[in-house]
């Protein structure tokens, strides 16, 4: 059985969408809530716990979406930049290593 | 015309005339009160808490705990208490029969006639009102935080509080509110309880309740209004700031999603107890006094954690329905269905596998990221106003921060008495 994974929703506005298109990553976007564009960066159980520890304002929405929400805006910006840099959404391990350094 | 409030009692404001106030407080022991008590003094004096004329005595607390009634039999669900420490009692030499001058931020706010001094088992209150004695229940925490001695007796404002911008137009006490409803010609008004910035799920809760409330009434003239009644009280970090809540709720009217003919926004000062079913009954009483005829209740109204079942409040309301002068309107959740391409009710649409439910947390996360959502989810006018409020009132954040708590402009201040 695959381990459960929890998304961090990086909301995509026009500016971010342009960056993604330029990097050839527009396909990474999913749509939720009436067409709201989002990139989902997934965390495993240990990474989820590490994030909640590292960023105390963050909240795990256990009730509705099973996602990690309310990360500070600049943290989301850094995660987004990492996705663009690595051209992949599988960047959380590397991000956490850098963030906890 | 007498304005009849909850329990069949006439609503009378308890506020001294300006010319008698200074003389009335001269020489009285001055006892400072905190914001919760100040809020409740306002609620008593203006009639939100009708038939209460002051803080409760022991017999009333007994009756509220054991029977959810005042000692005279009137339905009442949450004790309204005035507390002091034994040291304060001794320092001021307070005894039964005294009259106190209650001060808020060093200004005389109200006089209180001390009719009774007593103590009470706080855990017993918690069990009766909240159904638990756990300290992590916020209502229990508030109860345990009361000091050791309770004072009972009527209170009277010595001056009207000054409501500071941008809240001033939204402070509409019961007698004034009833006048406004008459001026609008509304025959039925349904209350929407909120502490939120509205997304379209909330907007549709109101629209759905408006339809339910309209029912068999004729449609030639607008006869039904929605009153958004925002609860303003103690803030917790991460809540939306009060300014954003009240202004965005009103923006739904200003931006035309509703209109003057069917929508109004106001505030009530109250520190939420999260008493679930008992808080639902309490909200029904508050809004009865405001002159409303109907009250929306969703699932788990005013609940917290997993203490209450989703329909417990509805069942408790049903037990006292005959004694309440307000009709409950029960609301199912609204959601976005991509198949329907619209906001719809979970009681209507059957594309269950495709439903995109509103999550308050997800919406807050979108707002926090500053990314404008589709208008079907969040109205652009509301979004722009939230961002404006963050800059203007929230020190850059639409959510409560330490800085906001320390530096915000108070919602109301007590003016100095004229000598
Ligand atoms: Zn559908």
Image (cartoon, coloured by chain):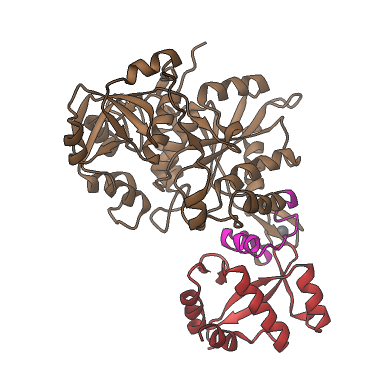
Tell me if residue B377 is in the magenta stretch.
yes
Q: Quadrant of the C terminus of chain B?
A: top left
Vertical arrangement, residue B22 with respect to residue B290, above or below: above
The chain that appears red in the image is A
Location of residue A18 in the rendering, given as x and y in whole percent from the top left corner: 81, 74
Location of residue A29 in the rendering, given as x and y in whole percent from the top left corner: 74, 76
Query: Dividing the picture into quarters, in which one does residue B32 lie?
Result: top left
The chain that appears brown in the image is B
Q: Is residue B348 visible?
A: no
Residue in the picture at 56% in, 86% down: A98
Q: Which residues are magenta?
A: B354-381
Q: Would you say B318 lies left or right of B95 here? A: right
Ligand 1 quadrant assignment: bottom right
Vertical arrangement, residue A53 with respect to residue B133, above or below: below
Residue in the picture at 30% in, 56% down: B135
Q: Would you say B366 lies left or right of B282 here? A: right
Q: Is residue B248 visible?
A: yes
Seen from the viewer's position, the closer of residues B218 and B245 is B245
Seen from the viewer's position, the closer of residues B411 and B332 is B411
Q: Would you say B327 lies left or right of B244 here? A: left
Seen from the viewer's position, the closer of residues B199 and A64 is B199
Q: Would you say B9 lies left or right of A77 here? A: left
Residue lying at the far front in this picture: please name it: B419
């Amino acid at each position: 059985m695959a381990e459960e994974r929890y998304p961090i929703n990086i909301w995509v506005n026009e500016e971010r969408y342009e960056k993604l298109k330029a990097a050839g990553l527009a396909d990474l976007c999913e749509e939720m809530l009436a067409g709201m564009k989002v990139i989902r960066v997934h965390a495993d159980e240990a990474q989820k716990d590490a994030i909640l520890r590292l960023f105390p304002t963050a909240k795990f929405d256990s009730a509705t979406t099973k996602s990690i929400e309310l990360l500070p805006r600049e943290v989301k910006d850094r995660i987004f930049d990492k996705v663009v840099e690595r051209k992949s959404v599988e960047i959380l391990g590397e991000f956490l290593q850098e963030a906890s350094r | 015309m007498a304005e009849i409030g909850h329990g069949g009692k006439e609503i009378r404001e308890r506020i001294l005339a300006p010319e008698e106030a200074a003389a009335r407080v001269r020489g009285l022991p001055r006892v400072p009160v905190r914001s919760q008590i100040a809020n409740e003094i306002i609620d008593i004096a203006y009639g939100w808490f009708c038939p209460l004329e002051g803080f409760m005595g022991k017999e009333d607390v007994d009756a509220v705990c054991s029977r959810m009634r005042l000692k005279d039999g009137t339905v009442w669900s949450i004790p309204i208490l005035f507390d002091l420490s034994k040291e304060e009692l001794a320092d001021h030499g307070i005894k039964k029969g005294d009259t106190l001058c209650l001060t808020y931020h060093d200004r005389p706010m109200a006089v209180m006639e001390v009719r009774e001094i007593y103590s009470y088992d706080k855990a017993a209150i918690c069990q009766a009102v909240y159904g638990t004695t756990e300290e992590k229940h916020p209502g229990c925490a508030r109860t345990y935080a009361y000091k050791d001695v309770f004072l009972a007796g009527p209170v009277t404002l010595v001056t009207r509080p000054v409501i500071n911008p941008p809240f001033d137009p939204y402070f509409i006490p019961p007698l004034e509110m009833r006048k406004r409803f008459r001026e609008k010609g509304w025959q039925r008004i349904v209350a929407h309880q909120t502490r939120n910035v509205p997304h379209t799920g909330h907007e549709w809760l109101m629209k759905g309740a408006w339809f339910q409330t309209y029912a068999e009434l004729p449609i030639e003239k607008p006869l039904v209004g929605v009153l958004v009644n925002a609860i303003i009280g103690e803030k917790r970090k991460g809540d939306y700031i009060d300014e954003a809540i009240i202004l965005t709720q009103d923006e739904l009217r200003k931006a035309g999603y509703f209109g003057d003919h069917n929508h109004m926004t106001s505030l009530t000062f109250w520190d939420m107890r999260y008493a679930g079913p008992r808080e639902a009954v309490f909200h029904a009483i508050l809004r009865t006094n405001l002159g409303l005829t109907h009250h929306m209740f969703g699932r788990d109204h005013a609940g917290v954690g997993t203490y209450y079942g989703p329909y417990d409040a509805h069942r408790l309301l049903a037990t006292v329905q005959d004694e309440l002068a307000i009709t409950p309107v029960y609301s199912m959740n609204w959601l976005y269905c991509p198949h329907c391409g619209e906001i719809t009710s979970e009681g209507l649409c059957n594309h269950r596998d495709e439903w995109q439910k509103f999550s308050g947390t997800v919406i807050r996360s979108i707002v926090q990221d500053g990314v404008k959502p589709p208008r079907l989810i969040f109205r652009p006018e509301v979004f722009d106003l939230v961002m404006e409020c963050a800059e203007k009132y929230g020190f850059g954040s639409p959510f409560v921060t330490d800085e906001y708590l320390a530096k915000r402009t108070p919602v109301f201040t007590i003016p100095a008495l004229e000598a």
